[in-house]
Amino acid sequence: MYMTKLVTLSRHILEEQHSFPAAKGDFTNLMMDLTLAFKIISREVNKAGLVEILGATDEENIQGETVMKLDAFAQDRIFKAMDHGGNLCCMASEEVEHIIPIPERFEKGRYILVFDPLDGSSNIDKNVSIGTIFGVFRRVTEGGDGTLEDVLQKGARQVAAGYVVYGSSTILVYSTGAGVHGFTLDPSVGEFLLSHPNIRIPEKGKTYSINEGNYNTWDENTKKYIQWVKESDKETQRPYGLRYIGSLVADFHRNLLAGGIFLYPSNCKDPAHPKPKLRLVYEANPLAFLVEQAGGKASTGTERILDLQPTALHQRVPLIIGSAYDVDKYCEFMSRAGATV
């Protein structure tokens, strides 16, 4: 990997802090603590096949899904890295039913961390890329422990968001609302180095990412859209190619760099009770924040993701995210009569 200048994640965060004269350094410290957790998780993921950390536990999370050993490890490491820094008033995780309080013996801060500790858990034993997704909010209540009100804020109010992909290399991508930047972990020096400055998603992509095995559960307008992207048309550069890894963070990362659209519509087998899968707080909101900062869009098919008011910690939503042209085109299909999300 060749870089014209060497910029560490730590230096980049500090330089961004200088853009805010009133900053006290709390957010900078928060990101330093979080980065440490990512390095530890990356180390364990990379040696997972050599130690007793692969496979499932005998537990289920709040989603009713089997907890993998690496899931539990990632959850524990993020909590232990973040609980004592004095920067957070609470946390919330996809793996935990209720908000996670900061232990009483530690100082309470002015930020909230929401996270999916290990996205793509079903791929862990198959050596497929997995990742961590996170979002940061500034608290809205006054002092003391954080509350549900602090956590259930619209995604547009995030002050930062990001993800880590644990793949052939470990890459951290984040934004504080001033562009999107990617850093690759150099294990030889233990530092994330700037490798993808000022990421911009192409206006239009050439690929779509969707689990076509769910075809029979889609609403009719989604079926029509997928048929449309498969048709040949030189003017709109179709057909698109199918690229689907099955790990949200990995599919999103590829599309962010190369352009394209990721779709996870609701299960509409029962049209009266459509069932979305992805979590608004831990998955859709952070990725929507990033894609918009990079020039893309994120929607349910009818509403902008970042405008949604969460009503529950583990609320699920359809997620259509990627290049602006492609998301807009899908929304055109969903605006037709009889659309269901």
Image (tube, rainbow, N blue to C red):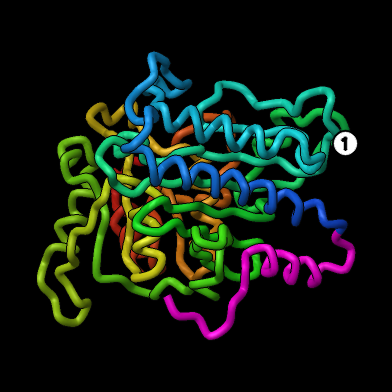
Crowding around mark 1 (Cα neighbors within 10 Å: few <14, some 14 to 19, many 20+) is few
Residue in view at x 47 percent, y 47 percent = 42
Please, which residue is most extreme toward the bottom here? Answer: 4
Residue bearing the label numbered 1: 142
Q: Is residue 2 magenta?
A: yes
Q: Is residue 257 above or below residue 93?
A: below
Residue in view at x 38 percent, y 14 percent = 58
- Find residue 328 and report its horizontal and vertical position in percent: 38, 64
Please, which residue is most extreme toward the left here? Answer: 232
Name the quarter where the N terminus is drawn.
Answer: bottom left
Q: Give the quadrant of residue 40.
A: top right
Judged left or right of residue 88, residue 248 is left
- Find residue 36 and report its horizontal and vertical position in percent: 62, 48
Q: Of helix, strand and loop, which one carries label 1?
A: loop
Name the quarter where the C terminus is drawn.
Answer: top left
Magenta part of the chain = 1-23
Q: Give the quadrant of residue 48.
A: top left
Residue in view at x 39 percent, y 19 percent = 57
- Find residue 9 and report its horizontal and vertical position in percent: 63, 64
